[in-house]
Amino acid sequence: MRELGAPLVALRLLATDLADLPAGCVAVSTVYPDLLELTFHGDLAVFEAWREALGIESGRVDYHEQGDGRTRVLEAECEFAGARLRLTGFAKTPVRTLAGAV
């Protein structure tokens, strides 16, 4: 467990210092032992709340779509408490309708 120390300490600090923010899915892996991943599904506003709380500039956020444009994805990384912290947000793309279509 020692090699996972940095992301686990970062997670403990986030759980204490940012406890009022909505929880996301958490991932820590021995494949990337310096990385803590927080993933948010369904609401990009939650991603944005975390981004702002961590002081990540909006210009450092990557945007793309997947699933033939059905899903919007936001991604950003920063250093936090000695770990690399990756935020990822997923949300359905709003349904687009043609004007005048019935």
Image: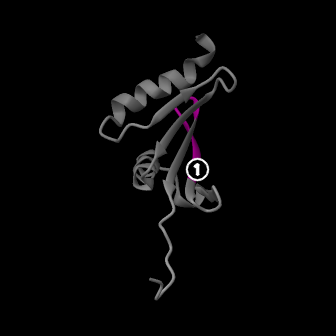
**Residue extending furthest toward the top:** 1
Q: Position of residue 45 (x, y in %)?
A: 40, 55
The residue drawn where x is 50% and y is 73% is 96
Q: Position of residue 4 (x, y in %)?
A: 59, 18
Label 1 Cα crowd, 10 Å radius (few <14 / some 14-19 / many 20+): some
Q: Is residue 10 above or below residue 93?
A: above
Q: Position of residue 95 (x, y in %)?
A: 48, 68
Is residue 81 magenta-colored?
yes
Query: Quarter of the image containing the N terminus?
Result: top right
Q: Which residue is mark 1?
A: 75
- Which residue is at the front of the view, 102 or 82? 102
User: From the viewer's perspective, is 47 left or right of 65?
Assistant: left
User: From the viewer's perspective, is 88 left or right of 46?
Assistant: right
The residue drawn where x is 42% and y is 52% is 43
Q: Is residue 5 above or below residue 41?
A: above
**Residue extending furthest toward the left:** 20
- Which residue is at the front of the view, 68 or 38? 68
Q: Is residue 81 visible?
A: no
